[in-house]
Amino acid sequence: AMNSNDVTVLEDSLWEIQSAIHSAAVEAGWWNDLHTGESITNNPLTFSNKLMLIVSECAEAMEGDRKDLMDDKLPHRKMREVELADAVIRAFDLAGGYNMDLAGAIVEKMRYNAQREDHKVENRKLAGGKAF
């Protein structure tokens, strides 16, 4: 279990990551309409579209793993690692774009999961327990 100082450091670090990733995406123009320059945050499709981009990165990671491929952009790394990084980057960017407290949600969810009976090894070993 993490002590309260570890939790604070983790949450602060996650906030810094989210801020840095989202700022880079804003700077690159990913949060404005390419032609009008208007913010795309209020477009009702933006959240869903960006969410599906996370899914596509996960699918690319799976494909890289399935074929044991090296990445084409970072050839010294496995594709599954780089595509997983892309998924995380997109998730933090999306959270930043909608002012979500992803850091707080991650910390709270980790605490919750640590107490879940269905996440404990002894219960996972039982018939009908969670295999993964």
Image (spheres, grey):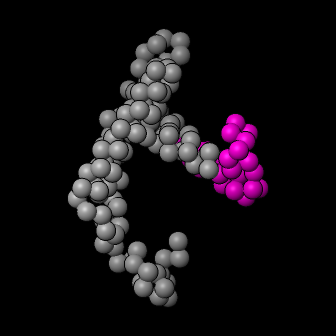
Residue at figure coordinates x 28%, y 55% from the top left: 7
Question: Relative to residue 28, is residue 1 depicted above or below?
Answer: below
Q: Considering depth in this image, is 81 or 26 the residue closer to the camera?
A: 81
- Magenta-drawn segment: 54-80
Vertical order, 97 against 117 (above or below): above
The verdict on residue 64 being magenta is: yes
Residue 76 image-quadrant placement: top right
Question: As drawn, is 32 to the left or to the right of 113?
Answer: right
Report the residue at 33% width, 51% height from top: 10
Residue 85 at x, y percent in the picture: 55, 45
- Residue 116 shown left or right of residue 56 in the figure: left
Please state if 108 lies on the left or on the right of 95 as rendered. Answer: left
Q: Position of residue 26 (x, y in %)?
A: 44, 24
In the rendering, at what x and y percent does residue 36 appear?
Answer: 48, 11
Toward which corner of the image does residue 43 lie, by quadrant? top left
Name the quadrant of the N terminus: bottom left
Q: Nearer the viewer, residue 131 or 111?
A: 111
The answer to whether 125 appears left or right of 97 in the picture is right
In this view, the residue in front, 55 or 63, is 63
